[in-house]
Image: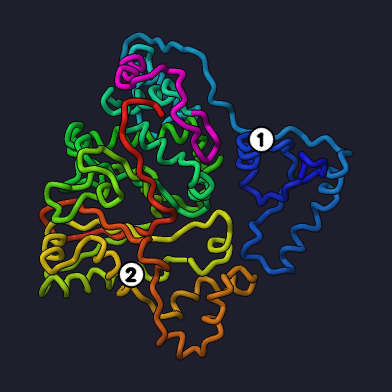
Amino acid sequence: MERAGTPTVVIASAGFEHDILATAEAFGMPTQQFVVVPKVYNNLTVEESIAQTEPVVDELMLLLQGNRDRDAFDGPATNDASDESFTASDGRTSFEVFNLTFAQRNWTDGYPVWPPTPSRVARLLDGVEGRGSDVVCVLPPGNGEATVAKVAANAAMAGCEPEDMPVLMAILRAVAHREQRSVLRLGLMSTSAHAPLVVVNGPVAKQLGINGGRCCVGPGQQNAVNTRISRAFHLCLKNIARWVPGLMDMDSVGTARKNIVVFAENEDESPWEPYHVSQGYAPTDSTVTVFFTSGEWDLSIQGHVDGHQLAKAIASYSGGNNNSYMMGVFGDHPHQVPLGRLLIVVPPHAGPLAEAGFSKQAFERFLWQQGKEPVARLIEPLRKLYADGEVRKEYEWLFDLPPEQQWTERLPVIERPEEYSVVVAGSVRAKNMLMPTRTHPETELVTATPT
């Protein structure tokens, strides 16, 4: 509107000021004019909304008329920097000074990092068939230009090796897919606890030692490679793409999953084709797939009668009402956010399921058919949205059902069976993990070339 000559002013809830400035700069907004109200509007009554808006109307009108220069807002410091040196009486102290400085500038993930010295960065560039100035991609949420050199600098801080670079670049390209960029941006900037999760497939997993077996989701020496790649990914999103808590990552509470999870599919112990093969890639291809998760459940199933009963037991963990596919804002909106499920199945359960005749695709469809909940549970979190007219038209009838029928009528917790993804990982004990997902998974080939 401003580019067309119409002045605009943002009405911002307190706590979103930094976000407005960063967003305006990232998305090329002409101005950064805003007024601040105390609370977020979503849960306010009409009367409360009016009461908090009236006091800023005069200021808003002055800004619209261009009659007042807004006081400069102390926005976030830029993370551009020239070469720096850190010296002290000994190497250990200089390392500590370096880490303290980078942490104070908010350039780390909160843990100690390795200095991205020219020699470390140059060593990582040896893992790439290209120049440091080559652009890998433009990263959401802040439209950061990820050059090979910038990626290598963040990878150096995470302690990566040259052979990690092709995997890291593939992850970044997957996040930056043009078709999904708007949806992924919503996931990264949301006030909900959405977080990326990366599954690695193909020969590269064994070549690098990326764990897909026991305890593959979590810390430990067995996950040393998983962890350094995940940290590098996190640092690239933060320092290149501005995925900074309170800046463009606006979580209300947050989640430990934002210490991003990277693991390999356990292809050796899986009875099914690998995930990337089911997506049309060759078994000899190496790929990464990025999911955006919004929670997790531990599926503790202590034994089973047979493969079919096991399938029913797993499907009974539907994930409850952690879904919103009825919402118009997420359904008919151009930036539709599909809601799905990622199920991590351990080999001791994948084997009996396959022996019972379930292909991976058949099992995914079975999960959709069996994973149903009473309408009452599905619609209860959406009553305010229904009152505001933000529920998709084809689902409005659910709110008009008699209360008894809302408990007897059952619907799938996910709208389409295609939104289920099954990946085999872990080992030894038959405990699975179920995660809601907030976007279509994005798969990318691992290559040594930047793009």
Q: Which residues are magenta?
A: 120-145
Q: Which mark is residue 28?
A: 1
Check disc 1 and report its element: helix, strand or loop: loop
Q: Is residue 216 or residue 111 the one in the foreground? A: 216
Is residue 144 part of the magenta span, yes or no?
Answer: yes
Query: Is 254 located above or below residue 127 in the figure?
Result: below
In the image, what residue occupies the spot 14% across and 63% down? 354
Left/right placement of residue 347 relative to residue 103 reads left
In the image, what residue occupies the spot 37% across and 21% down? 96
Mark nearest the camera among 1 and 2 is 2
Q: Is residue 252 or residue 300 the one in the foreground? A: 300
Q: Position of residue 313 (x, y in %)?
A: 21, 72
| Circle 1: residue type | Gly
Q: Which residue is mark 2?
A: 368
Q: How crowded is the residue under tag 2: few (<14 C-alpha within 10 Å), some, or many (20+)?
A: many
Name the quadrant of the C terminus: top left
| Circle 2: residue type | Trp
Does residue 221 appear anywhere in the picture?
no
Q: Position of residue 187 (x, y in %)?
A: 48, 50
In the image, what residue occupies the spot 41% across and 36% down? 173
Q: Is residue 248 or residue 112 the one in the foreground? A: 248
Q: Quadrant of residue 421?
A: bottom left
Query: Is 186 located above or below residue 94 in the figure?
Result: below
Q: Which mark is residue 140?
A: none
Name the quadrant of the N terminus: top right
Left/right placement of residue 32 relative to residue 400 reads right
Q: Quadrant of residue 444?
A: top left
Check disc 2 and report its element: helix, strand or loop: helix
